[in-house]
Image: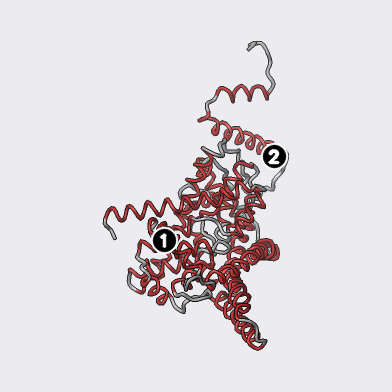
């Protein structure tokens, strides 16, 4: 290169970029952005005149606490745990009331079919199959979403969510993805389908696809009832009664952290293999804290998110109820098709520490995670329609009677956490990606991870003679 040649600023940057190593690329980029902002601040001081009266800079003081590497993570975890606790605790009563109302309608529908002398099979298909499934899905999904999404939107409107992205940016950048994935992951706690839609905020197609494919590793509100019930029976039941709920809640939180860990690990693996690439720049100018707008929060959380997701869930749950009822009530040689499926899956179930009925319940629960436990209970009790027991103790007795141990419970919870997304989420992935290939990959990849995890744990426990 001619030493006397005058280079343009762009040519200077290109030559510098070629000289620095990949290791120093991120530092170079960050220093350049910081320099630009520092110069912009100096220019603004010369142009904008401020009053002599000094105002207390609350935004900066709060950011020093909320984005600190010492206090940022604990506060972030406590706030999200608080939202999670409010969602789980606050949804209990509304879910119970809604279930009573919807199943009260079921009783009236059954009476109507009896008065009309309708065939038993028609009552079974329409009421015990389709309507009962819809009632369960709505009563389990609607209250948690109606609580979680407003809480999440409140944090978003206050200006705290960008701080979460700022705190987690380094972790996701090390995984080869985008810092905004932390926001889409958090949205997945309410509903994975909503988390998939939230991935639109990521501009890079590669990083957006990674966020979509890994969102399933955080449990949605459809999986929390299963995790909480089994944790309460088998984990909380190992300690004194007054510590049941605390122990069970702590174990569910550990499972959530494990899900986040799997999100980072799988994101890293995808970024190094199928979706290689350099993480895109994420220059985040933290917005000021704002006073929340109640009307805006309610509209965005209830209309744009809750109703939208619930509509898709209902659309896939109705056919699931129909298929489940048919499989449970069509008999071949005095045995239902449901039992034949369970027998076929039994060898695989034993290898991964479960049984054929559990795997069958997960498969039939594809349309909605909420119906996995009711299908399993129905199968164990040889009933022709989905049902729930009236207490956790009765459920625990039924599960133990059918050969459950602490290892079975652990594998069921891990499989529930890691397995394929529900049909609503897969439908949303298909809509967002526009690719059947990636939709199938989004179903197969986590299922293989779930099977491998349960297999390793089961075989290790058996090898060590712990059970």
Q: Is residue 400 visible?
A: yes
Q: Residue at x 57, y 61 (%)?
A: 190
Instruction: Name above or below for residue 24 compared with residue 394.
Output: above
**SS state under label 2:** helix
* Quadrant occupied by the N terminus: top right
- Image height of 89 relative to 353, above or below: below
Tell me where residue 130 sits by quadrant.
Answer: bottom right
Residue at 58% x, 63% y: name it: 367
Can you say whether 394 is above or below 349 in the image? below
Q: Earlier in the sequence, mark 1 or mark 2?
A: 2
Residue at the image position 57 percent from the left and 43 percent from the top = 178
Q: Which residue is mark 1?
A: 346
- Residue 49 position within the rendered picture, expressed as x and y whole percent measured from the top left: 71, 43
- Tell me the distance, in whole angstroms, between the alpha carbons under discs 1 and 2: 70 Å
| Residue annotated with mark 2 | 44
> In the rendering, which numbered label is found on residue 287?
none
The residue furthest left is 465
Q: Secondary structure at mark 1?
A: helix
């Amino acid at each position: 290169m001619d030493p006397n040649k005058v280079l343009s600023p762009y040519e200077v940057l290109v030559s510098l970029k070629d000289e620095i190593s990949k290791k120093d690329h991120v530092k170079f980029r960050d220093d350049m952005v910081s320099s630009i902002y520092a110069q912009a601040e100096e220019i603004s001081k010369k142009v904008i005149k401020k009053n002599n009266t000094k105002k207390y800079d609350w935004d900066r003081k709060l950011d020093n606490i909320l984005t600190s590497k010492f206090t940022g993570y604990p506060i972030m975890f406590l706030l999200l745990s608080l939202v999670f606790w409010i969602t789980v605790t606050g949804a209990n009563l509304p879910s119970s009331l809604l279930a009573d109302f919807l199943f009260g309608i079921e009783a009236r529908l059954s009476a109507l079919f009896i008065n009309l002398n309708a065939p038993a099979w028609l009552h079974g298909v329409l009421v015990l199959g389709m309507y009962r499934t819809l009632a369960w899905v709505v009563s389990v999904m609607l209250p948690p979403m109606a609580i979680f999404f407003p809480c999440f939107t409140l944090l978003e409107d206050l200006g705290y969510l960008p701080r979460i992205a700022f705190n987690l940016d380094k972790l996701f950048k090390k995984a080869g993805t985008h810092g905004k994935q932390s926001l889409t992951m958090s949205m997945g706690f309410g509903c994975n389908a909503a988390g998939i839609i939230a991935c639109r905020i990521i501009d890079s197609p590669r990083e957006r696809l990674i966020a979509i494919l890994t969102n399933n590793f955080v449990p949605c509100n459809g999986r929390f009832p299963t995790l909480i019930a089994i944790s309460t029976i088998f984990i909380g039941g190992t300690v004194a009664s007054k510590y049941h709920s605390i122990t069970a809640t702590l174990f569910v939180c550990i499972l959530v952290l494990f899900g986040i860990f799997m999100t980072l690990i799988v994101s890293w693996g995808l970024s190094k293999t199928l979706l290689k690439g350099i993480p895109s720049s994420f220059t985040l100018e933290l917005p000021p804290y704002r006073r929340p707008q109640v009307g805006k929060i309610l509209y965005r959380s209830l209309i744009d998110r809750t109703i939208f997701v619930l509509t898709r869930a209902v659309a896939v749950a109705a056919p699931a109820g129909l298929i489940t009822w048919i499989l449970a009530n069509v008999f071949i040689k005095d045995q239902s098709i449901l039992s034949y499926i369970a027998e076929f899956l039994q060898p695989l179930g034993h290898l991964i520490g479960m049984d054929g009925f559990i795997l069958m319940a997960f498969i039939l629960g594809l349309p909605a995670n909420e119906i996995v436990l009711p299908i399993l209970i129905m199968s164990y009790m040889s009933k022709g329609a989905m049902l729930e027991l009236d207490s956790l103790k009765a459920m625990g007795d039924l599960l133990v009677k059918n050969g459950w141990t602490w290892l079975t419970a652990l594998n069921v919870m891990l499989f529930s956490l890691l397995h394929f997304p529900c049909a609503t989420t897969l439908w949303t992935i298909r809509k967002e990606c526009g690719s059947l290939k990636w939709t199938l990959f989004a179903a197969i990849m986590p299922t293989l991870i779930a099977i491998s995890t349960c297999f390793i744990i089961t075989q290790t426990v058996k090898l060590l003679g712990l059970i």
